[in-house]
Image (cartoon, rainbow, N blue to C red):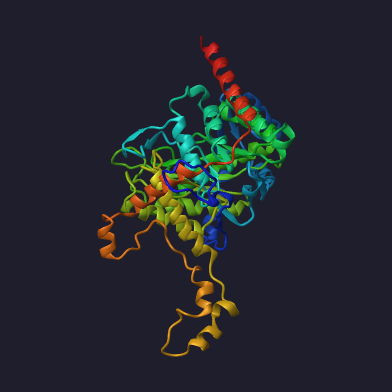
Amino acid sequence: MTAEAGSGVRTRLEGSTYLKPLPWKHAVEILPPRSVAKLHDNTLAILENVGVKMGSKIWLERMADAGAKVDFAAERVWFPPELVEEKIKLAPASFDLGARDPALDLHIGSGNVYLSTDGCVPDVLDLASGERRKGTKHDLSEITRLADALPQISFHWQPVSATDTPDYVRPLHEIEAQLSSTSKHIQQMTVVDPWNARGMVEMLEVVAGSKEALRARPLMSNFQCCISPLSWEGEPLEAIDVLAQAGIPVGICSMPIACATAPATMAGLMSVMNAEILSGITALQIAYPGHPTWYIPYATSMDLNTGALNLGWGPEELTSEMAGAQIGRHYGIPTITGVFGSGAKTANWQAGVQNGMSAFGKVFSPADMVTAAGTLVFCNAYSMDELVLDAEIWDIAWTFAKGFDFDEETLAFDAIAEVGPANHFLGTQHTRDHMLDFWRSGIFDRDSWEDWEAKGKPDPVDNARRKVREILDTHEPLQLEDDQLKELSRIVNAYQVERAEEDD
């Protein structure tokens, strides 16, 4: 149910009570088997002969105890191939993620592709002015609430960074904002140190009700990133300890950039990416055997004209997304890849082409979770208009992937026989029963030329903006209890005061 836009009446939207994950019905392998085999062998050679840097004594000791070669002074680890192959098999192929509304729980490995917003974007396109500015905690709450109402969005990253909060405690402010703005699962990707990880666990225990309840149904998950090329800093490793001990799933992410932090070939780029991810998963499974994790490949390329990320991306980025999902499937490990993330500055033709191609890449080479709905400038600016437009693209892909039945009812022999030659189907019961089965856009222009002109020549962005404002005027997410809200605020304030006192 909805209220009229601008009425001031807040209500739960019907769309927030269900999810529309992409059905996993296709798996086109973009890499031939021999290429996957070569990539795997090259990855094992890198991990055995080049190794990775690990900036944590505790984790270095764990790797040494497990049989890896370790240089403690250089903080360097070399992994025997058999150790890597043994440990990555321990990563579970399926697990569940909790949501505050149990109807919105996610079942990883069940054949669904779950979509989220993007994460930690520094800027936002102001809804009223359209101007680019720094994101705030309020922006994070509003975008999360908007995404809560869109069934195409199954879980949340942190769509914008709360830049108006102290950076040392910013992740906890972001957790507070999102927990009160959605009943869906949240994947926290800005907690990258043990101090904020402890605060995150405290806050989640308040909402879950107990340590045991949180472990049984983790309301948040997390991932940690290797620094390309081949370097793990100590704090992310120590954050893994805090989160894994609380039962929170932790993914392993690699973000190499071709020509900069990775070689200038697709095979070299994917070799660095694969080595970084497998090093993290191997280490995680050594420390916490069987702990839920993800294979998270986010490879991209550099624009050699500017030195920045390639905003005009095309076949290489699409290939790396699809190949990354394929490699994760090869290892039997749940996978998270990017989707959307156009380099366009506005919701324009470029955004539509890049995001449309990317979405259909997920139809044919699916991952378990995909991210980046709503971003522009290659994940450097967030747009609520674009979020609604991306949800519309996802809806098309969802309908396409779901497919169409060919059974006695849908083949419609009786209806065809009833109508016969030289007649029409408008008045048949079969048409009345199925006329709403066809996908219809609520965003794309469907008017005649004359009606379109009479309405002032609106485009899909205008329609998306109207939908954004309607949702923000009317949608109320599942509310936390007052005592929970107070306790979350107390925890954030306590951590902020503690760090401020330490700095003094």
Labels in figure, total: 0
Q: Nearer the viewer, residue 265 or 248?
A: 248
- Residue 218: percent from the left, percent from the top? 66, 39
- For the question of whether residue 480 can be seen, the reply is yes
Q: Nearer the viewer, residue 368 or 375?
A: 375
Q: Nearer the viewer, residue 454 or 316?
A: 454
Seen at 56% across and 25% down, the residue is 74
Whether residue 402 is situated above or below residue 182 in the rendered picture:
below
Seen at 50% across and 76% down, the residue is 431
Whether residue 317 is situated above or below residue 398 in the rendered picture:
above
Q: Residue furthest bottom?
A: 421
Left or right: residue 55 versus residue 376 is: right
Q: Residue furthest right?
A: 212
Seen at 37% across and 58% down, the residue is 444
Whether residue 160 is situated above or below residue 13 in the rendered picture:
above
**Image quarter of residue 65:** top right
- Residue 375: percent from the left, percent from the top? 41, 43
Q: Nearer the viewer, residue 8 or 307?
A: 8
- For the question of whether residue 228 can be seen, the reply is no
- Residue 396: percent from the left, percent from the top? 46, 60
- Residue 5: percent from the left, percent from the top? 42, 46
